[in-house]
Image (cartoon, rainbow, N blue to C red):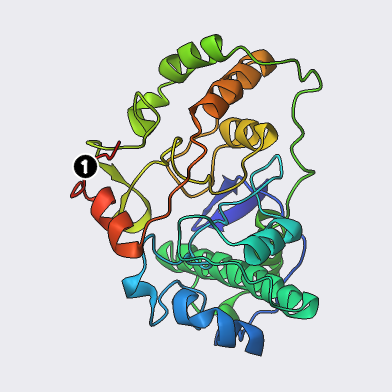
Amino acid sequence: MLILRRGNTWVPILLAFSNCLIALHADGYEPSKTYRNFCASCHGEKGDGAGKASRYLYPKARSFIDSPIQFATAANGIASEHDITEVIRKGIPNSSMSSWKILTQQQIKELVKDVLAFQREGIKRQYLDLLTNDGTINSPNEELLSNELKMQLEQLQFQRTTSSPKWEPPNSMAAGDADNGKSLYQSQNCHKCHGIDGRGSYGIDLIGEFGFPVFARDLVTEHYKYGDTATDYMRIIRLGIPGTKMPASTTLTDGQLIDLAEYISTLRSPQSRGLTNAQRYQRAIGQTSKKP
């Protein structure tokens, strides 16, 4: 826990974890040439998701400044360097994030560094805004920070971008009970977003980050965003997906987790389909109906 001073009071701030620091620069982070060539058109030169192509994308390109990385295999829900590497290499199914496995290992390392640096830049901005709003400093300028406040910022950046050890599935991986899993699908309210039949949020209005409409995954006909194995299902159910409506299910027993993952595996159709940006958007705003 980190204690921040707000006016004449000291306020505790809960922190996550982080593995590297970024130097304080008044003009923001300057990404690599690799990022500018391959990523900036969607994610923006400043990592804010406001690239020139972003207006044509659905879902919108991720802002590394304001949003967490969704694919995180760590128990604390913070993406590791390996997680970020995997997203770059494999892409995200049924989105505009394509695979960049054509890049060299060195180029991918540069991009991972850029993503983490943008995250720390975003944390810095939030920190400066907080101190400005409570009157600790008179403008969001890092040069106004005392040595103590700079050290607190470094701690905050460090702790909010460091992943914990990887989440591990239950030790006992007995065969799951799909019938019990189906009951859990109802009692855990999975159907309220993913639909009774698992086909997604048709007829359900969902709003995501920054007010954009979102559509809960079609568990039957779409490739899953972050893995298609039983372990992937269990991890996503247990940990949720950061920055989305998908919550963590921390109260399920290991047996229930296995059963629910087993039921989800029975929903999958052998024929998966992809949609265009326009089709995904029309579906999210309720302009398309469910197809057989």
Say which quadrant the C terminus sits in: top left
Report the front residue among 133 and 55.
Answer: 55
Residue 86, given in percent of the width and then of the height, sits at 69, 59
Left or right position of 46 against 199:
right
Q: Secondary structure at mark 1?
A: loop
Position of residue 172 relative to residue 273, above or below, is above
Query: Residue 142: in sight, yes or no?
Result: yes
Residue 171 placement (x, y as % from top left) = 81, 22
| Residue 136 appears in the rendering | no
User: Which quadrant is the N terminus positioned in?
Assistant: top right
The image shows residue 65 at horizontal and vertical percentages of: 51, 68
Disc 1 designates what residue?
289
Residue in view at x 45 percent, y 60 percent: 95
Question: In percent of the image, x 79 and y 17: which residue is there?
Answer: 172
Quarter assignment of residue 42? bottom left
Is the residue 40 above or below the residue 202 in the image?
below
Instruction: Tell me: 111 left or right of 185.
Output: right
In the image, taking residue 44 as reference, residue 84 lies left or right, namely: right
Amino acid found under the numbered disc labelled 1: Ser
> Residue at horizontal 60%, vertical 75%?
145
Q: Quadrant of residue 155?
A: bottom right
Q: Nearest the camera: 162 or 131?
A: 162
Mark 1 surroundings: few (<14), some (14-19) or many (≥20) residues within 10 A: few
